[in-house]
Amino acid sequence: MRNLPTLWDARTLKDHAKAATERAENIQADQDWNSAAIYAERAVSDLRKRFAICPLPACRRARGCRGNPTIWLPPSAAQTAEASIEDIYVQIQQQRRGASWRRRRLDVLVPVTRKLPGKK
């Protein structure tokens, strides 16, 4: 008969805490990548002044892209912007590192889906 570790074994608790930390870091990294992609897509859309013909009222009012994901940007444009997305992601990570060093919360764009008017 094998000796199974007890539920409150110090090693087991340490492993669970480490796994929880890694899961949180992975979720945060995914959110940062999505934020970087949105920043890049919005910049391209704003350069092309697509907000003027966008069906989202928020884009027309702000005179800039506010959609997540951008409605008027073709998927091929997002694929070509991969290098700029990586640069923005690195900047977000550096800002996050600096904010944690100063013990402040970093204000990052959180990806939220915006829908066309009249759609639920």
Image (cartoon, rainbow, N blue to C red):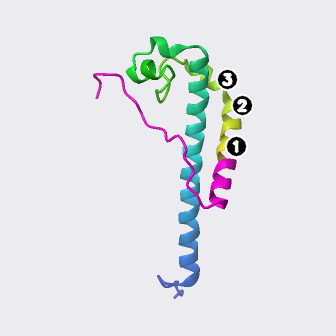
Distance CA(mark 3)–CA(mark 2): 8 Å
- Relative to 55, is 26 above or below? below
Residue 79: x percent and y percent?
63, 25
Q: Is residue 84 left or right of residue 36?
A: right
Residue 76: x percent and y percent?
60, 19
* Segment tinted magenta in the rendering: 94-120
Q: Is residue 36 magenta?
A: no
Q: Quadrant of the C terminus?
A: top left
Residue 29: x percent and y percent?
59, 48
* Label 1 vs label 2, nearer the camera: 1
Q: Is residue 83 left or right of residue 120?
A: right
Instruction: Give whichever of discs 1 and 2 has the lower sequence position.
Output: 2
Q: Is residue 47 left or right of residue 8?
A: right
Q: Nearer the viewer, residue 60 or 23?
A: 60
Q: Disc number at residue 90?
A: 1
Q: Which residue is mark 2?
A: 83
State which quadrant residue 85 falls in: top right
Type of the residue with mark 2: Ala
Contact? badges 3 and 2 (CB < 8 Å): no
User: Which residue is drawn at the image coordinates 71% and 36% (left, top)?
Assistant: 87
Q: Nearer the viewer, residue 109 or 75?
A: 109
User: Which residue is drawn at the image coordinates 44% and 18% (left, top)?
Assistant: 60
- Relative to 81, is 106 above or below? below
* Label 1 vs label 3, nearer the camera: 1
Distance CA(mark 1)–CA(mark 2): 11 Å
- Label 3 packing within 10 angstroms: few (<14), some (14-19), many (20+): few
- Identify the residue at the far top of this view: 53
Q: Disc number at residue 80?
A: 3
Q: Main secondary structure of the magenta part?
A: loop
Instruction: Give whichever of discs 1 and 3 has the lower sequence position.
Output: 3
- Label 1 packing within 10 angstroms: few (<14), some (14-19), many (20+): some
Type of the residue with mark 1: Val
